[in-house]
Amino acid sequence: MSGNNDYTQIDNLLREDRMPHIWCPGCGLGSVLHSFLTALNKSEVPLDKVSVVSGIGCTGRTAGYVKLDSFHTTHGRAIPFATGLKLANPELKVIVFSGDGDIGSIGGNHLIHAARRNMDLTVICVNNFIYGMTGGQVAPTTPLNARTSTSPYGCFDRPFNLPKLVTAAGATYVARWTAMHVRRLEKAIVEALLKPGFSFVEVIAPCPTQYGRKNRQSTGLAQMDYYKENSIIKHGADTKDVDIDLNGQIVIGKFVDIECPTFYDLQTEILGKTFPHMSKTQAEEASA
Amino acid sequence: MAKKVGMEGSLAVSEAVKLANTDVVAAYPITPQTHIVESLAEMVANGDLDAEYIPVESEHSAMSACLGSSAVGARTFTATAGQGLELMHEVLYVASSMRLPIVMAVANRALSSPLSVWGDHSDVMAVRDCGWIQVFAENAQEAHDLVLWAFRVGEDTNVLFPVMVNIDGFNLSHVTEPLLLMEQADVDKYLPVNKYPLPLHPDKPVTMGAFGPPFIYTEAKKAQEVAFQNTKETILKGWDEFEKVFGRRYSPIETYQADDAETLLLTMGSLSETASLAVDNMREQGKKVGLVKIRLWRPFPFEEFRKTVKNANVLVVLDRCLSFGGPGGPVASEVRSALYDQANRPKVVSLIGGLGGRDVTPQNFEYMVDRGLEIAEKGSDSEYEMIGVRK
């Protein structure tokens, strides 16, 4: 492969001056970031229109590693920041790239409201079932019975099923893959990037240091083996059936891909040409 | 006989929380306080501490859960740092206004942006007016002791205010130091059972936090202010009793080589030990330098402070926090204000340093004294100076 068709050439999208990165050996974030950047190339979205927004945590570091317009926000606030960015400049392709602790916990309220509005954002949520950076505490995505530093005998707090949550809230594209399914993940991210409205891609990823070590998957490879053995592709699966149990089956695939007017569509329809902040071209495009 | 152990500052805090037989811990992970609540979660899971550990989804929820548990009369603890403390902000005011004696350890951390997990005092200074009793610890022993003291003072029916124990992030939270672990029997002697006078209880319903229209809001705040000023007596008594039981003495303002000092350094928290090394060096050089440490930050001990510094010529204040466009660091501004009306008072020099985990060495303190004397003599064209800035 060479030239313009070599989508896997992502060097130009990484800030080499920020390397080495902080991610542990065996972490899934490198693979997920590679899939994302490859997908970005493939989607042919103009790079000068791309903005990557992250919150806090290991995944949140992504904003600092990409050679793109990026913003590292406070904990949980990546989605509201991205919403402001998108509404102020609707021409941008705004991607939120953050972790389960950031998006599903402290920022959980923003997640459901962005989905409810069908805000035109792509959210890539890397779910490692734990708060990795702060030392492996129990998170709202930790499977029942999983051990963490704050649930030493197992978690007894029922976890979120994130695809179900965002589907119920109104997301128009919902997929889940693992860090092992890099090609399919890449394809899903391309679809998500090109989908108008709120698209959500959950990526199950290894955290051997904090999660695997305490749950009999002590290396990144062991966690990848687990994904390989236990992932079942079920496109169109009802998201209420995609709960993840400790070391149990992981249902992956594209669950939701529906058409719905976006926030911007409805705003344009209702406020129409009287909406003072909307340029003529944007109003025409939106109503076309 | 208390046992001498080597212990990390964070664990010194959680050991005190355990010894206090705390009922509820609600917390969210944030560096650098995480070891405190992690170890508490483990104590609860192991059955060493009979408490509810609530792994909430944010700091805002942590403090809100603490309000609930404290309102039913449960002994309540949480810990946070930096951004987490700021996310709690609105709830902190509710805790103090509802007179809920929550105890919180803050592993002081810088504020974003840029993102920094390292230590300074920007977090606590942003909540200094929230009506909590606030103290600073200098080492792991003090962190251990002050947490126990905080429960005793906060829950005293003459007080009923939440208490914040500040321990410098990393410098205290992550450093292992020798300390005397308190004995359970002594703790039980020192800390009575929490008897919150008006808890939420279905048999005797009360309403908390109801609407306060203009005709009553001012009076409510006046009542809170009077009650807060009146905490001082119990605060001091808490330290007197502490000395009787445990043999260690605490005071609102503490000093080192300050009696005959012409120039005084002023610090809070873990940098005080570093500053005392600098004082030793300068004393050897024949310089009459001393150190003043503010232990009790709220309510501010005006009387003790004025008395301590009145004979000095120059008071050099190190703030680990910026007040952008203000009259100096928050501590320097306050002490300047506290001294303004005094006949005998030192000149106050405001220096800012140790931000975002930047080391402050004994040499830096020696520079501060020299620079402070220079500014005091010749004046300066700015209200404050930042030290240690790389050009």
Image (cartoon, coloured by chain):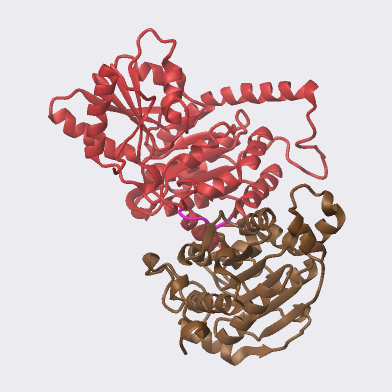
Chain colours: A brown, B red
> Overall secondary structure of the magenta stretch?
loop
Report the front residue among A120 and A280.
A280
Q: Position of residue B237 (x, y in %)?
A: 49, 28
Residue at point 56%, 55% (across, down): A73
Q: Position of residue A170 (x, y in %)?
A: 79, 68
Report the front residue among B122 and B171.
B122
Q: In this view, which residue lies farthest toward the top?
A: B343
Q: Quadrant where the C terminus of chain B lies?
A: top left
Residue at point 37%, 40% (across, down): B138
Find the magenta span and give its range.
B28-32
Residue at point 49%, 61% (across, down): A134
> Where A25 sits versus A111, above or below?
below
Task: Classify residue B379 as left or right of residue A221.
Answer: left
Visible in this render: residue A127? yes
> Where A244 sits versus B128, above or below?
below
Report the front residue among B62 and A187.
A187
Q: Is residue B235 found inside the magenta-colored segment of the image?
A: no
Residue at point 62%, 71% (across, down): A124
Q: In this view, which residue lies farthest toward the bottom?
A: A229
Q: Position of residue A101 (x, y in %)?
A: 59, 64
Q: In this view, which residue lies farthest toward the left?
A: B285
Q: In this view, which residue lies farthest toward the right?
A: A270
Task: Classify residue B186 as left or right of residue B55.
Answer: left
> Where B199 sits versus B115, above or below?
above
